[in-house]
Amino acid sequence: MATKKNTTPKYIFVVGGVMSGVGKGVATASIGAILQGQGFNVSLVKADPYLNVDAGTMNPTEHGEVFVMESGLETDQDMGNYERFLNKSLPKENYMTNGMIFKYVIDKERALGYKGACVEPTFHITEEILRRLKEVAKKEKSDIIVVEIGGTIGEYQNAIFLEAARQLRLKNKKDVLFAMVSYLPIPSTIGEMKTKPTQNAVRQLNGYGINPDIIIARSSESVDKKRKEKIATMCGVLVEDVISAPDVSTIYDIPINFENDGIGNRILSYFGVSPRKKDLVEWRKFVKKFKNPKKEISIAIIGKYFETGDYILSDSYISVIEALKISAAYAELKVNLSWMSAKKFEDKKNLKALKDFDGILVPGGFGETGIEGKINVIEYARKNKVPYFGLCYGMQLMVIEYARNVLGIKNANTEEIDPKAKDLLIHIMPDQKEKLVRGDYGGSMRLGLYEAHLKPKTLAEKAYKTNTIFERHRHRFEVNEDYVEQLEKKGLVFSGVSPDGHLMEIAELSGDIHPFFLGVQFHPEFLARPLSPHPLFDAFIQAVNKKK
C-alpha cells in the first residue's frame, strides 16, 4: 500500500571516485528516470566546479557540448542528458557553477548585502549553494532532488559543494543520501577486477566527513558477488547497496540495469518511503526498438569540433548524435555516423568520399575553420540530391552556398568571417554588434526559447504538423533580409520566420526540387528525447531511409 506523500524533499548527491568520465551524469539521469517512474516528482541539478559563470565561453573540444536551456542559460552537456531522461525541460535554477556562486556572493558583498560581515567560503558560499537547492525544491515542488557534483573526489575545485552537502546531511540525516560512482579496473596483465581504487576513493570521501550510502561500481564487466562483498566490507555499505554498472551498448540501457539491481527500491528504503507506482514500460519499449533495428543507414556529420590531440571528441555534438539515434530507433533503423573534418573538403577532389553516405548533416559552430569545405559539401548534397540537414551555422552556410552557386553572387559571405565582403548574406544582429564592441561575450547571444511561424504546405510544416513552433537558439548572426526576395525568387523557401517576419528561422527547397534540403537557425537537437523524438530529425531520417 502506497504511503502518504511526504512533503519534506529528499536529496541525493552523486559524486565521482577514481577518475573522471565514469558516467556520473548518465548515472544521475538514470536515477532520476527510475524515481520518476516510481511516481515521484524528481528534479536533477548539476553543480560544476569550474570558475566560469556558465559553459558558454568554453571550447567544445575541451569540455564537450554547450547545452542551452529553455531560459537561455548555457550549461554543461549533462543537463541535456537530464532533460532527455526525464522527458521534460528544466529551469535555470537546476544548474550552478563555482563561478556563478562566487560571483553572486561577491556582488552581494560589494552591495553591502551581508551588512559588513566577514564573508567566508564555508558559510556564505555553502549557504548560497543550499539556498539554491532549496529554491529548486520550492519552484518545482520536488519530492526528490538528485544533485551531481562535478569533478572527482580529492580535487580542490569541488570541495565547497561537498562541504555544502555535508552540512545539509548534518541537519537532515534521513533526507540526504550520497551515491558514489566509482571505477573498478581490470588490468589486462592481471585479468582480475580490482576494488582497491574504489576503497581509496571512499577513504578520500571520508576525509570530507562523508561516507557513501550507495556505491555504483562502473567497470567493463558486471561486478560479481565476491567484489560486491569486498566493497561492502571495506567501504562501510551493505552488499545490496553496491550497484553493478557494466559497459553497455547504449546509455538508454542504464536505467534498466540499475533497476534490475534494485537501486530505486534501495534509495526509497533509505528515505523510508514506498514506490507510488512502477513504470519504466515506455522506456523499455524504446530501448527494445533502439536495440532491434531492421535496417541500417549512414550519415556523414561534417564539423570542426572533433579533433583533440590524437582523439576524436564526439561529445562536442552529443545532442545531435542522440537526436539522430532516437529518431532512427523509431523508424526501426540503426544509424551509422561518420565524423568528417570540414577542412578535408576544401579540396573538391575529396567530395567523392561522400558518395557512400545516405545523408549529410552540418551542425552548429563558430569561426572560419573549414567554412569553404562545408560550403563544398552543401553544394554536393544539393546537386546530388543527398538529404541534407543544416543546424544553425549549417543553415547560414546553406544560404551562402545557394547565393553563390544558384544566384551567381560569387562574393556571398557571412559577416562573422569577412565583415568587409561585398555581399553579406549573413549579418550580425544589431543588438549583438553593440555587445561585441563592449566585449560582452558571455551569455549575450540570442539564447533560449523563441517562437516561429511556419508557411503552409512546406516540408517544415508537414514535419511539425502545426504552424507555430518554439525552439531553442544560440547565435549572433542571421540571414540578411535584404537578400530574402532574391533567394526566394530562385527557389529557396524560408518556411519558418519569427512572429514579426524579420528573422529567417528555417530555409528549405521544396520536395519537387530535392528530397530533403533543409536548414534551421535554431538547435532542434536540444528538444529531442527518447520518449518524444524531434519532428525535424524524424523527417530527415525518413528522407535518408527513402534514399537508401
Image: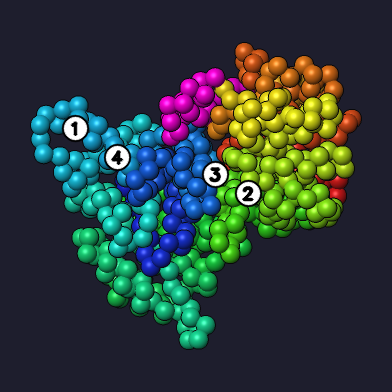
- Nearest to N terminus: mark 3 or mark 1: 3
Q: Quickly name the residue at label 3.
A: 84
Q: Which residues are magenta?
A: 430-453
Toward which corner of the image does residue 123 lie, by quadrant? top left
**Disc 4 marks which residue?**
101
Mark-to-mark CA distance, 3 and 2: 25 Å
Q: Residues within 10 Å of mark 4 (few under 14, many from 20)?
A: some
Q: Please name which of the two marks, 1 or 4, marks the residue nearer to the observer.
A: 1
Q: In the image, which is nearer the foreground, mark 3 or mark 1?
A: 1
Q: Nearer the viewer, residue 6 or 532?
A: 532
Task: Name the side, left or right, on which 382 lies relative to 142.
Answer: right
Query: Residue type at mark 4?
Result: Ile
In the image, residue 236 above or below residue 388: below
Q: Which mark is residue 32?
A: none
Residue for point 30% across, 76% down:
233
Name the residue at 51% across, 24% down. Answer: 432
Please name which of the two marks, 1 or 2, marks the residue nearer to the observer: 2
Q: Amino acid at mark 1?
A: Glu
Q: CA distance from mark 1 to mark 4?
A: 12 Å
Decide which of 292, 149 is in the foreground and name it.
Answer: 149
Q: Are marks 1 and 2 in contact (CB under 8 Å)?
A: no
Q: Earlier in the sequence, mark 3 or mark 2?
A: 3
Q: Is residue 447 magenta?
A: yes
Q: Position of residue 193 (x, y in %)?
A: 45, 79
Q: Is residue 408 left or right of residue 58?
A: right
The amino acid type, in three-letter code, at marker 3 is Arg
Relative side of 283 to 70, left or right = right
* Residue on which the image places disc 2: 304
Residue 109 badge: 1
* Mark 1: secondary structure: helix
As drawn, 455 above or below 535: above
In the picture as drawn, the residue positioned furthest to the right comes out as 512
